[in-house]
Every structure is written in structure tokens, then in C-alpha cells.
Amino acid sequence: EGLSQSMAKELLNSPAHFMARYGPEAVPFFPTAAMKQGTAVHCRVLEPEVFAQTYMSKDDKPKEPTVAELKVQLDAAGTEYPKSAKKGDLEALLWPDGKPAEKREALASDIWREVHGAADALRTHDITGHWFDPGQQDYRKMNEVSCMRTSDLGQLLKGRFDRIQIEDGVVKVLDLKTTVDASPRQFQRTAANLHYDLQAAWYTFLAEGAFPGLPVEFYFIAVERKAPHGISVFKASEALLNSGRAKQ
């Protein structure tokens, strides 16, 4: 339940846009290739313990066994089969409960390298290297944190922080963005086009409710998808937050 900042962005366009995306007759949304790569980077950085269980390189994807290889496996298991059996019949004998399915998402070799390259860049950066160091105490506990808070108008708001970093009594909300160009000029354009001011104000409001009495700072961390994986860190200014609050 609750209204997310992504939903609010659609409302900024119009109620019709909101219903088209989130209404009962909404057309299913399918992420783009760039979005899928961004999700993989998030998993690699924020959920390192599950990355290997979720993704694999297509280069490492097991090849389909040949008829001869299936027969070798059946012979080793002591299972009899007709000499003229076809591949489907052999697979049914070898896996009577169904052929094991590979549940991991296979990434193209170049995307696989880029995902790891972006994650490595974040962990060797002068600023983000400390923030995204999995050796920190409770590192995983402070990643992908869901939060809800009721607004002054009685609307239940929700959000999920990429990471919460508490340093010297300051709550730092870290939002990771994968991008083509992390330069300040380009990111400023992207922030304006995608209502990043609303997101910064939204998450700051949620964090202030979750950590009452502590100052909150919001940071965008932009990392380029392709080598050399340039990184920029942007702290949300009060002017940006006020702009987002007006939309909120």
C-alpha cells in the first residue's frame, strides 16, 4: 500500500498517465536493456551475497547435452533406454520430474564485464569506496531498506532506499544511478527531465521520519555503465529539495 515517488511522477504528468501505468487496465511494463543492466549493477553492489545466485555470464551457461552425452549419463545411472530413443525421450528418462531449469539470468559477456566494472569502480572510488564496502558492519542490513510514512495531508507514502549510511550522527541516503554520462552537466539535465528533485525530497521526508532528530542528507551516485565507469557524487541542495517538496 501507499504512494511511491515513481507513482507521483506519473501524477505530475496527469491522472490519465497514472492510470495508464498503475490503473486496473494498465499495460504490463517491461524494463529496457539499460534498466536491466542497472538492476544487475544494484544487485552486484548492494546484494553481493545473492548476485551469483541471480546472474551468470552467457559464456558460462551450460550447453545443451547431446544425445550421446545423455546416453552416457543414463548408462552411468544404470537406466535402460531404447537404442533408437530420441533426445526428448532420453531427457524424460534422465529427469522424470522435469528437466532442471537454469533460474539465473544470463548476461551477454560485454554486459557481464560492464556490471562488474561499474561495481569495482564504485568500491575503489575515493568517496563511494567506503559507502559501498561490503566489509562494513551490517552492510547488507542497511541496503534496499523499505520505509513508509504518512504525509501532512494523510497520504501514506512509501519508498525503498538503495542504501542508508550513518556517519557522525548524519543519515546519508544514497541513491545509485547507472547512466551513459555521469558528468555534472548531463546529470543536471537528466535530473530535471526525470524529476530527481521529487525523489530527493520524497526520500528525505521518509528518512526524517525513520530517524527522528538526526539530520538527513541525500546523495545521488551516478556511475557510467561503460568503461572507464566514470563516477560523480551529487549532494541534494536545499534548493533542489524545496523544488521537490513543491511537487510533493
Image (cartoon, grey):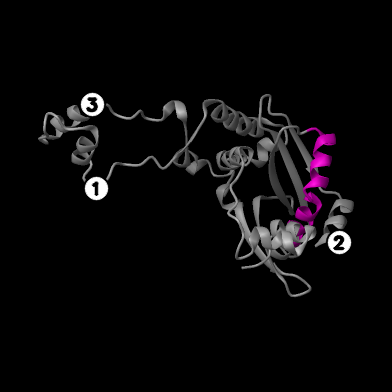
Give the residue number, with chain letter if any, for mark 3: 69
Locate the N terminus by quadrant: bottom right
Secondary structure beneath disc 2? helix
| Residue 70 position in % (x across, y down) | 22, 30
Q: Is 193 one of the magenta-colored residues?
A: yes
The label nearer to you, 3 versus 2, is: 3
Q: Is residue 28 left or right of residue 73?
A: right
Among the two numbered marks 2 and 1 on one chain, the one whose residue lies closer to the N terminus:
1
Give the residue number, with chain letter if any, for mark 1: 97
Quadrant for residue 148, please give it: bottom right
The amino acid type found where label 1 is placed reads: Asp
Inter-mark Cα distance, 1 to 3: 19 Å
The amino acid type found where label 2 is placed reads: Ala
Q: Which residues are magenta?
A: 183-205
Q: Is residue 36 left or right of residue 59?
A: right
Q: Residue at x 14, y 35 (%)?
A: 77
Locate the C terminus by quadrant: bottom right
Give the residue number, with chain letter if any, for mark 2: 246
